Image (tube, grey):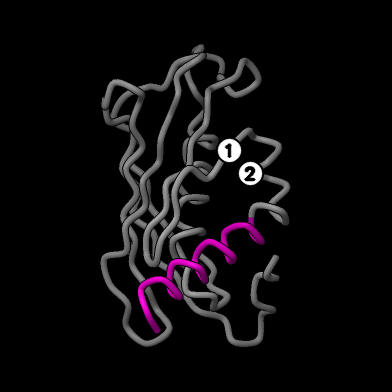
Amino acid sequence: MSTTDAQQVAEESSAAMVAADAAARSAGIAVAAIGPGHATATLTVAEHQVNGHGVCHGGVLFLLADTAMAHACNSYGTSTVASGADIAFLRPGSLGDELTATATERALAGRSGLYDVTVRTADGTVVAEFRGRTRQVPGLAAPPRV
């Protein structure tokens, strides 16, 4: 497959996922960049996303990182789901912060994948580091192409 074809598959898979992902959409997450094995997702922290300490809820940070990984691992047009993930919260995100999660594929072995995701503020401050494991699922319907 040519680089152009691979990029087109990534873009089509991502567009289909965006259309079907109510959780990410309702959180205000947008996919800013996509390519084979990598993706970038963004979110501006809203009032309903802060916790009792007035900082971005960890579950929201996890959702942002997981969404970036989902687009990266599905960028080949094969249905792939998370099989596990860990996140380290390094600094709090604040109300109004523009957060960017950048997912990078680290390894593919058979149907299993490994992805690292860094969540940063607009000034480049690292808020969280996420490592996710994925599994291609042959019986699961592939993301519909748009």
Mark sitting on residue 24 = 2
Q: Is residue 23 left or right of residue 112?
A: right
User: Where residue 89 sits in the image (x, y, percent)?
Assistant: 34, 34
The type of residue carrying mark 2 is Ala
Position above or below: 2 against 58: below
Can you give x and y, in whole percent of width and height, for residue 135 in the image?
47, 76
Image mark for residue 99: none
Look at the image and say whether residue 5 sits in the magenta stretch: yes
Q: Earlier in the sequence, mark 2 or mark 1?
A: 2
Q: Label 1 amino acid?
A: Ile
Q: Residue at 56% x, 15% y: name it.
A: 52
Tell me if label 2 and label 1 are in contact, CB under 8 Å: yes
Mainly helix, strand or loop, the magenta region? Answer: helix
Q: Is residue 60 above or below residue 65?
A: above
Name the residue located 58 percent from the left edge and 75 percent from the top edge.
79
Q: Quadrant of the N terminus?
A: bottom left
> Helix or strand or loop: what does disc 2 sit on?
helix
State which region is magenta.
Answer: 1-17
Q: Quadrant of residue 78?
A: bottom right
**Dot 1: what SS?**
loop
Q: Any magenta on residue 36?
A: no
Residue 136 pos. (x, y %): 50, 79
Viewed as shown, does residue 4 lie left or right of 15?
left
- The residue indicated by pointer 1 is 29
Residue found at x 58% / y 66%: 13
Mark 1 closeness class: few <14, some 14–19, many ≥20 residues within 10 Å: many
